[in-house]
């Protein structure tokens, strides 16, 4: 299935006009970046790169797409002929999926002709804006949870395809499982789930419901104990399943108080190894508030799939360099007061002191070849990797293996954050972004 129509009309009208005036084949550099971190957060998490590369493989204009464009007079005949043969033949460099980013980080750099690169704007932004927003929220929840496991349970609070993408982004940023089966199948994420309140309400009594669930799933299952009275529910659960019951789930009430009461009751009943999972509209702040409570695991729904109040990462995709008629490279940038951008091709490095991040260093070059290499920044970690070279996609970032690699990379680089980055309150970015001239 083609992904070419996951775009905005103006991408193609610009392309058609550029073909007409002769600028379509000018070598160009586009950059995807975020001017600021949404919600006063202290860092962002890059997610969606693997999905973008997979959809880039499908970015073709077939007969159906061309017929629609022709019938609706979206572009002229010359543009239709160009699009019929279109495949991205340029180069894409970017931050690895799971990497941290800060204001001005050159998260994705797309190099090719103007026609090659301009049509990818909407696809790249729609994927990375959504997935990075979810991953950033999920990382904050993972930090708040500490060693306690997190399950993503937000499918019913998102569009069907967004739910799968959100489960993947949350997993990359530290969640351990998802309730979404398609995410499990497509991305290899562990899945979880037992029963909802409707299961208890289906039966003539709570005891009948619990007994049927244990008969089906075994005593290691988790029983939902708050359909009626929580104390009675816990007592019934242990009576039915025995002290070897795997867990109980609480989905309502004042969770710190209720969790303490349930833990005490379980211990009194001899179920000292029975785990307590809490759900009920959790976000990073509620999870942090439960840090001292006897809770063993969390299930998070609405908050994680909506970016915990910030459903977009506010990323933009801008032309930052192009060749002029003489073949010389020119840095270009939008100059408006509140939406300005910084022109020039860039190389990015994470400056470290004793393994702790102290700055995001972005070397800016007016020319195309004058871009810094790691040798110019010996106390820093290079942040960009080649994702696509001359149209050939590096498939190591895709699929289940790419998702696992992104998760491992995120958990590793999160260890570089300074302590102040772990706080949940609104503040400036945890490290500054420093723009420097590239070494000539």
Image: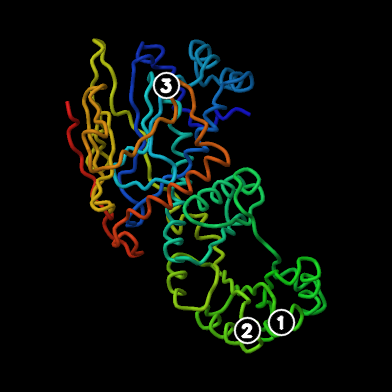
Which quadrant of the figure contains the C terminus?
Answer: top left
Local crowd at mark 2 within 10 Å, few (<14), some, or many (≥20)?
Answer: many
Q: Which mark is residue 369?
A: none
Label 3: which secondary element:
loop
187 shown above or below 241: above
Question: What residue is disc 2 on?
Answer: 266
Indicate which label's residue lies in the foreground, 1 or 3. 1
Quick check: marks 1 and 3 in contact, CB under 8 Å? no
326 shown above or below 105: above
Relative to residue 72, is residue 411 drawn left or right?
left
Q: Position of residue 302 (x, y in %)?
A: 54, 60
Indicate which label's residue lies in the foreground, 2 or 3. 2
Number of numbered markers: 3
Q: CA distance from mark 2 to mark 3?
A: 61 Å
Of callouts 1 and 3, the N-terminal one: 3
Of callouts 2 and 3, the N-terminal one: 3
Q: Position of residue 93 (x, y in %)?
A: 38, 31
Question: What residue is disc 3 on?
Answer: 90
* Quadrant hosting residue 206: bottom right
Label 1: which secondary element:
helix
Local crowd at mark 1 within 10 Å, few (<14), some, or many (≥20)?
Answer: many
Q: CA distance from mark 1 to mark 3?
A: 62 Å
Local crowd at mark 3 within 10 Å, few (<14), some, or many (≥20)?
Answer: some
Relative to residue 142, is residue 271 drawn left or right?
right
Quick check: marks 1 and 2 in contact, CB under 8 Å? yes
Q: Which mark is residue 238?
A: 1
Q: Position of residue 242 (x, y in %)?
A: 73, 80
């Amino acid at each position: 299935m083609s992904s070419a129509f996951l775009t905005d009309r103006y991408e193609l009208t610009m392309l058609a006009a550029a073909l007409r005036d002769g600028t379509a084949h000018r070598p160009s550099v586009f950059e995807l970046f975020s001017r600021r971190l949404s919600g006063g957060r202290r860092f962002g998490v890059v997610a969606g790169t693997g999905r973008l590369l997979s959809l880039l493989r499908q970015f073709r204009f077939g007969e159906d797409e061309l017929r629609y464009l022709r019938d609706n007079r979206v572009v002229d005949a010359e543009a239709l002929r160009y699009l019929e043969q279109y495949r991205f033949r340029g180069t894409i460099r970017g931050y690895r999926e799971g990497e941290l980013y800060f204001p001005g980080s050159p998260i994705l750099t797309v190099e090719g002709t103007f026609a090659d690169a301009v049509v990818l704007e909407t696809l790249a932004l729609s994927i990375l804006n959504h997935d990075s927003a979810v991953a950033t929220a999920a990382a904050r929840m993972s930090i708040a949870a500490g060693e306690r496991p997190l399950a993503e349970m937000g499918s019913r609070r998102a569009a069907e395809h967004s739910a799968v993408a959100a489960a993947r982004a949350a997993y990359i940023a530290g969640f351990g499982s998802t309730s979404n089966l398609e995410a499990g199948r497509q991305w290899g994420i562990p899945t979880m789930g037992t029963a909802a309140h409707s299961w208890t309400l289906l039966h003539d009594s709570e005891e009948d419901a619990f007994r049927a669930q244990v008969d089906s799933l075994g005593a290691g299952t988790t029983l939902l104990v708050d359909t009626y009275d929580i104390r009675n529910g816990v007592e019934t659960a242990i009576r039915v399943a025995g002290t070897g019951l795997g867990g109980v789930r609480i989905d309502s009430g004042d969770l710190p108080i209720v969790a303490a009461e349930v833990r005490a009751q379980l211990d009194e009943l001899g179920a000292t190894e029975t785990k307590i999972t809490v759900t009920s509209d959790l976000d990073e702040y509620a999870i942090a508030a439960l840090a001292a409570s006897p809770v063993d695991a969390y299930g998070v729904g609405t908050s994680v799939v909506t970016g915990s109040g910030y459903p977009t990462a506010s990323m933009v995709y801008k032309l930052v360099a192009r060749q002029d008629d003489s073949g010389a490279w020119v840095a270009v940038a939008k100059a408006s007061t509140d939406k300005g951008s910084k022109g020039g091709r860039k190389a990015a490095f994470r400056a470290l002191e004793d393994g702790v991040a102290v700055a995001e260093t972005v070397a800016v070059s007016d020319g195309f070849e004058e871009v810094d290499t790691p040798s110019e920044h010996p106390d820093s970690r290079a942040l960009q990797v080649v994702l696509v070279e001359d149209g050939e996609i590096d498939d190591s970032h895709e699929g289940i293996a790419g998702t696992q690699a992104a998760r491992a990379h995120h958990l590793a680089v999160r260890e570089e954050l300074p302590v102040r980055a772990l706080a949940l309150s609104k503040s400036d970015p945890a490290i500054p972004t420093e723009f420097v001239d590239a070494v000539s």
